[in-house]
Image: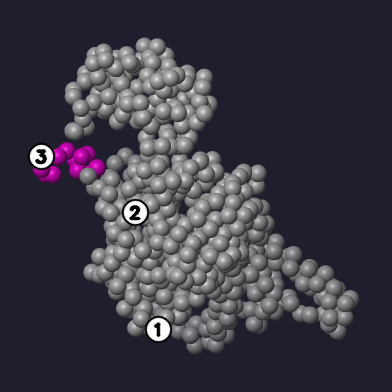
Amino acid sequence: MSIATMSLRRRMRERGLDAVTLLVIPGVVFVLALFIYPFLYGLVLSFTPKEGGWLANYQKFFSDSFLYDTIYLTLQIAVPVTLLNTVLSVPVALRVRLLKRQRLLTTILVIPITLGTVMVAEGLLTYLGPRGWLNRFLLEFGLTDSPVRLIHNYWGVMLSLVITGFPFTFLLTLSYITGIDPALEQAGAMLGARARQRFFRILLPLLAPGLAITLALAFVQAFTVFPSAVLLGAPAGPTRVISIVAYQAAFEQYDYSLASAIAMLMAGVQVIIIVALLGARTLVFRGPASTGKG
Amino acid sequence: MPITSRDFRELRLDRIGRDFGQVHALRDVSLTVGRGEFVALLGPSGCGKSTALNCIAGLLQVTDGAIWLDERRLDEVGPEDRGFGMVFQNYALFPHMTVRRNVGFGLVTQGRPKAEIARRVEQALALVRLETQADKLPGQLSGGQQQRVAIARAIVVEPPLVLMDEPLSNLDAKLRLEMRAEIRRIHTMLGCSTIYVTHDQEEALSLADRILVMIDGQTRQIGTPEELYSRPAHPDVAEFMGYRNLFRCRAETTADGLAVTIGAARLWGTAMDAVGGAAVAAIRPDDLRPTGDGPIDATVEIAEYHGRDFYAVARGGDGTELYFRSPMRVNPGEPVRLAAPRDRVLVYAI
């Protein structure tokens, strides 16, 4: 029987379409209604400014250093945090992989995610404040003469992003690392490679694709920082991140069109960074992290 | 640079043991492997043979005993410094490196000059007949080819000892036979001492100069393949060596030899221990043959045609299952009389 004479149902099945395919409909509707539509709406809105030509919002953003500097300010926070969280995750995950009671440690590390950024920020305000435990301890033991300023500036935002971001990068990294066949490291050891060589020649190249994904996701999370930049940072100064400017445009100046344009620029920066990361990933090995039967 | 070199006389395991918590995975195993010797560790899965191999490799620490390479104590040396080659069950090839770089890895960690690495890798690849695949990634190779890369990678550093952990278990039957011959050929050519872990008695018999049979973490017997095959020291070893017929019996020494009574049948046997009274008789299916006047009465239940002969299962009058081979056709339901030569009925005390 040729394909042309098969019943419609059989031809659909031949292409992998059967009743199960219908289950994707709710998902598709959800994505269309809550992601694609608002995005397109915002995109169109950003080109219909309150006054001026269709590019007026973008012209305004890039002509006002008070606005365009926020890209640089946000990157200044997001890039170091992303790198720090990812770089810290690797050795911790390498060690945790060998633990028998992994679950307990993993649970402890995941708690900051469940607390949410606002609660972590509140906690840090008290803990790191001028009368907080940390400064009292430092003053009591004479380690410093005046309270160390760790809130309402760059470092406060940085610390809160490490606390909420690290568990996330750690869990991702752990899952990538446990996906690497331990026999590969053993094979390296049998061939005379010491711990350092095993890490740089075997583990790291196999981990690189996973690290690229981790970096991309951690970056997106850090770049869109808002609550901790307001609560723990100096939202008028060094931690005037791009999401604050978008918020101010929308809810203080009621210029939704400009706010949409800023949101689009945020998305643009993120896309550029992510494409660059995933592009770099293709330069290294991209296959599975183990070889089984051929 | 490994501390060991190819010039050694013997590797000695001196009563090594390994505990995992309360579990004794390995107890009191002693073995001496001479230079150029091929020794197989044979046993059912979970018997501790891979544990023993990992202890020799240094990937596991021994909890008892010592490992010596000539006068040098090895069990406190890390795997990096032992300089042994190892072929893993799943090959453990580095998936991000080409075949050439996989094979050259051990030479790179030794800091050899580039020209020497290139030359020796080329030689090793020629030895396993993979010259044309040198620039492929392991994922692009078939199972048999990956296996050859793993072997080349282990031998290129010219280790004093090559360890192989069930290297053929992931291959299909035909390829397994081919690679078995290949391993034998490479061993003969290079003369490197080899310790080979397997659960396949045929593999062990065909490859090894000596076999250590391990059951429950302990040595049951060490001997040449011939010794193990014809005179297993213990019913467990006999079972493992293909003595499928293990019968509870009564044995008594008479003027004419050892008389064995299995159910209603009476035949002659060979004593493997000091036997008398209750005993176990072990007979290989190949040694149990149908004859017109055999002492064992049975009815054929299953007969499989194997080309050269028939492999059959029969049931005795008391319900015992008997496995035998027959050069002529036997049919299910037929009565049959079976006999075995006196020296092929091995009797063990229980």
**Residue A270 within the segment the image draws in magenta:** no
User: Could you tell me residue B31's position as x and y percent?
Assistant: 51, 53
Main SS class of the magenta portion in the image:
helix
User: Could you tell me residue A92's position as x and y percent?
Assistant: 61, 65
- For the record, the magenta segment spans A1-13
Mark 2, mark 3: which one is toward the viewer?
A: 2
User: Could you tell me residue B58's position as x and y percent?
Assistant: 54, 61
Measure the alpha-carbon separation of dots 2 and 3: 36 Å
Q: Is residue B72 left or right of residue B302?
A: right
Res. B195 mark? none
Q: Are labels 2 and 3 assigned to the same chain?
A: yes
Mark 2 Cα shell of 10 Å, populated few (<14), some (14-19), many (≥20)? some
Res. B113 mark? 1
Instruction: Classify the position of the C terminus of chain A by image quarter.
Output: bottom left
Q: Dots 2 and 3: beta carbons under 8 Å?
A: no
Residue at the spot of label 2: A293
Q: Residue at x 78, y 68 (%)?
A: A127
Q: Are labels 2 and 1 assigned to the same chain?
A: no
Query: SS class of the residue under badge 3?
Result: loop
Mark 3, mark 1: which one is toward the viewer?
A: 1
Res. A1 mark? 3
The numbered mark 3 sits on a residue in which chain?
A: A
Residue type of the residue flagged with mark 3: Met
Mark 2, mark 1: which one is toward the viewer?
A: 1
Measure the alpha-carbon separation of dots 2 and 1: 33 Å
The numbered mark 2 sits on a residue in which chain?
A: A
User: Could you tell me residue A88's position as x and y percent?
Assistant: 60, 70
Give whichever of discs 2 and 3 has the lower sequence position.
3
Q: How many marks?
A: 3
Q: Residue at x 22, y 44 (%)?
A: A14
Instruction: Classify the position of the N terminus of chain A by image quarter.
Output: top left
Q: Is residue A222 above or below residue A104?
A: below
